[in-house]
């Protein structure tokens, strides 16, 4: 078995491993990100790794309606939405290697086997797969995340629930790491559910069982984070402590809160910082509270934004929701979202909203509804933000109703005049995994336009995830007709605007992937301020 040496030059690298018990969907990712934020506020450099025990190589081919949003990293990796939370909470730039999947681990081991790297050996889950997992974790932990700096503390979230067959090799790898590292170099955090019975009493049995399952795998948690609807009181904490051998002060109550950005503060109040710093044998420094100030800025206004969605679950649009929140906080404006189903909504649902947002999406379903919403926003001078597919459909809408090309459409949708067409490099591609135009692109913004004003520069880097583009044959007709392309990447159209509209902006890229509370996205700032103005002017009328 490969021994786990501390990486050269970074002898002090420490790990916080977060596992989950009882059921999925407890907010393990947000808990992980919040622990990271607490340490970051104390001046520690942190990074994060997400383990997804599925066989897919990445999240790119998964149905968002089942799995939630596919988040895109700067290097083009299509990953689990938790990595978006890490980036937003920790202001770091992660890469493909920070998302370890069973698919990636097995692929690598099988490639090594074919190359003959294990010549003579019978290749097995233990040690070959577990060695590979440990190698992946260690490599990701050492990757630069912050302008050339590497982390002092690496958070590792093990996806799934303890007891799942899929997670077993990962938990075994964690057990091996735990056995090899000094006690102060690895802390185990277990997130569980503490449900209430019909009388409202919090019950500890599910936590007892899940800790038991964890112990059977050789892992004793150092900290338990109990998710519950109410605060977990001292008696319940004592009981959990008695059954799990976790000290009472390391049983942390994490009750539901309305805004995820409050969670680090809530965990601080429970004494988590002190406990973690104790375990890791690091100084519990005086925290910088700037981040807390930013995420709890008072709201003095409220706007309502319609999102024309089609996947049915809000998690599909996680980064958009968060980006609206970031811009809203910066502008002291609470953004309420009215979710409208692209196939069912009525135009009257749009009459009293302050802005309309058409998000990204794939396939034909819902396209006509999105086009109706875009037309409504254009004709009624409602603030409008279009993203990726929303950008493409803005072009289709304009071509149909202003340029008079009634069968204008996107090649993705079906026959017609393809004002949106397949990217040349996509022609002939049959594999669907990881083959889109993905990740960072440098966009040139035309000086003197609204988008350049919003960014305060004429050059920016944003992230892509798409296969189609504006058909170059129609660009000059569209511009002559009034739809101006104000952002480009080489010969590709990236941003469009309507100068005679209060706020009409659409982007081929996804600005939401780079938004965070400390760095709200410029198009979202523009959109939310336009919504604010719209509200003020409709009130005045
Ligand atoms: N389906 C469109 C394309 O592939 C848009 C993708 C998206 O909205 N992310 O180009």
Image (spheres, rainbow, N blue to C red):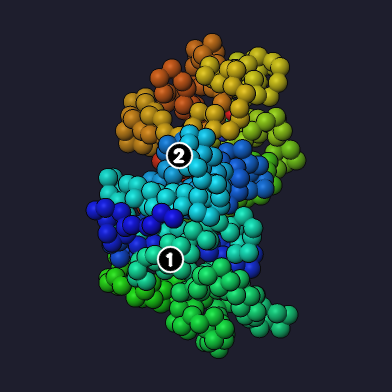
Q: Quadrant of residue 310 in the image? A: top right
Q: Give the secondary structure at mark 2.
A: loop
- Which quadrant of the figure contains the C terminus? top right
Which mark sits nearer the N-terminus, 2 or 1? 2
Label 2 or label 1, whichever lies nearer to me, is 2
Percent position of residue 90, x then y:
39, 55
Task: Residue at the far front: name it.
Answer: 120
Depicted 480 relative to depicted 298: above or below: above
**In percent of the image, x 66 and y 42: which residue is there?**
63
Give x and y (percent) for residue 425.
52, 19
Picture quadrant of residue 474: top right
Marking on residue 255: none
In the rendered image, the vertical position of residue 16 relative to residue 329, given as above or below: below
Q: Which mark is residue 178?
A: 1
Residue depicted at x 54% and y 80%: 244
Mark 2 Cα-neighbour bin, 10 Å: few <14, some 14–19, many ≥20: few
Kindly give the residue lying farthest to the right in the view shown.
344
Q: Position of residue 384 (x, y in %)?
A: 54, 36
The quarter of the displayed image where residue 359 is located: top right
Mark 2 and 1 residues: CB-CB less than 8 Å, in contact?
no
The answer to whether residue 286 is left or right of residue 473 is left
Residue at which label 2 appears: 117
Q: Is mark 2 within 8 Å of ligand 1?
A: no
Measure the alpha-carbon separation of dots 2 and 1. Answer: 27 Å
**Element assignment for label 1:** helix
Question: Within the displayed image, which quadrant is ligand 1 positioned in?
Answer: top right
- Viewer-nearest residue: 477 or 284: 284
Task: Give the percent coordinates (x, y) of residue 27.
Answer: 55, 62
């Amino acid at each position: 078995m490969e021994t786990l040496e501390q990486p050269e030059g970074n002898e002090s690298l420490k790990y916080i491993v977060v596992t989950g018990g009882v059921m999925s969907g407890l907010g393990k990712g947000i808990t992980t990100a919040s622990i990271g934020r607490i340490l970051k506020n104390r001046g520690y450099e942190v990074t994060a790794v997400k383990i997804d025990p599925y066989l897919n190589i990445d999240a790119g081919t998964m149905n968002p309606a089942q799995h939630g949003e596919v988040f895109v990293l700067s290097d083009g990796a299509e990953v689990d939405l938790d990595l978006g939370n890490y980036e937003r909470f920790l202001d770091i730039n992660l890469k493909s290697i920070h998302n370890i999947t069973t698919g990636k681990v097995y692929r690598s081991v099988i490639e090594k086997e074919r190359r003959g790297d294990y010549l003579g050996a019978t290749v097995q889950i233990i040690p070959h797969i577990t060695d590979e997992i440990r190698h992946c974790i260690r490599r990701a932990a050492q990757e630069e995340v912050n302008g050339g700096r590497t982390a002092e503390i690496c958070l590792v979230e093990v996806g799934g629930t303890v007891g799942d067959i899929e997670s077993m090799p990962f938990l075994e790898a964690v057990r091996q790491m735990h056995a090899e590292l000094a006690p102060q170099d690895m802390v185990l955090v277990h997130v569980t559910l503490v449900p209430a019975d019909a009388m409202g009493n919090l019950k500890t049995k599910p936590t007892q069982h899940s800790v038991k399952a964890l112990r059977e795998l050789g892992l004793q948690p150092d900290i338990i984070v109990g998710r519950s609807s109410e605060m977990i009181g001292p008696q319940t904490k004592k009981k959990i402590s008695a059954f799990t051998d976790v000290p009472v002060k390391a049983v942390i109550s994490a009750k539901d809160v309305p805004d995820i950005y409050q969670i680090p503060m809530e965990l601080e109040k429970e004494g988590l910082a002190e406990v973690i710093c104790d375990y890791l044998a690091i100084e519990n420094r005086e925290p910088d509270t700037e981040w807390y100030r930013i995420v709890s800025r008072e709201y003095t206004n409220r706007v309502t934004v319609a999102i024309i969605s089609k996947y049915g679950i809000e998690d599909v649009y996680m980064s958009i929701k968060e980006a609206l929140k970031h811009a809203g906080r910066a502008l002291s404006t609470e953004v309420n979202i009215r979710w409208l189903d692209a196939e069912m909504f009525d135009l009257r649902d749009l009459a009293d909203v302050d802005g309309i947002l058409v998000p990204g999406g794939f396939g034909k379903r819902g396209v006509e509804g999105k086009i109706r919403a875009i037309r409504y926003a254009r004709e009624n001078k409602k603030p409008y933000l279009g993203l990726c597919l929303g950008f493409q459909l803005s072009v289709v809408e304009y071509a149909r109703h202003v340029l008079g090309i009634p069968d204008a459409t996107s090649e993705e949708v079906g026959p017609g005049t393809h004002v949106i067409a397949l990217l040349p490099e996509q022609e002939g591609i049959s594999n669907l995994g990881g083959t889109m135009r993905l990740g960072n692109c440098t966009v040139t913004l035309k000086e003197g336009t609204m988008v350049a004003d919003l960014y305060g520069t004429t050059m920016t880097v944003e992230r892509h995830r798409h296969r189609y583009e504006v058909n170059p044959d129609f660009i000059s007709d569209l511009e002559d007709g009034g739809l101006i392309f104000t952002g480009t990447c080489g010969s590709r159209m990236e941003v469009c605007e309507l100068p005679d509209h209060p706020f009409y902006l659409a982007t081929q890229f996804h600005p939401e992937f780079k938004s965070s509370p400390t760095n709200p996205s410029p198009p979202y700032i523009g959109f939310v301020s336009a919504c604010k103005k719209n509200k003020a002017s409709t009130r005045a009328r």
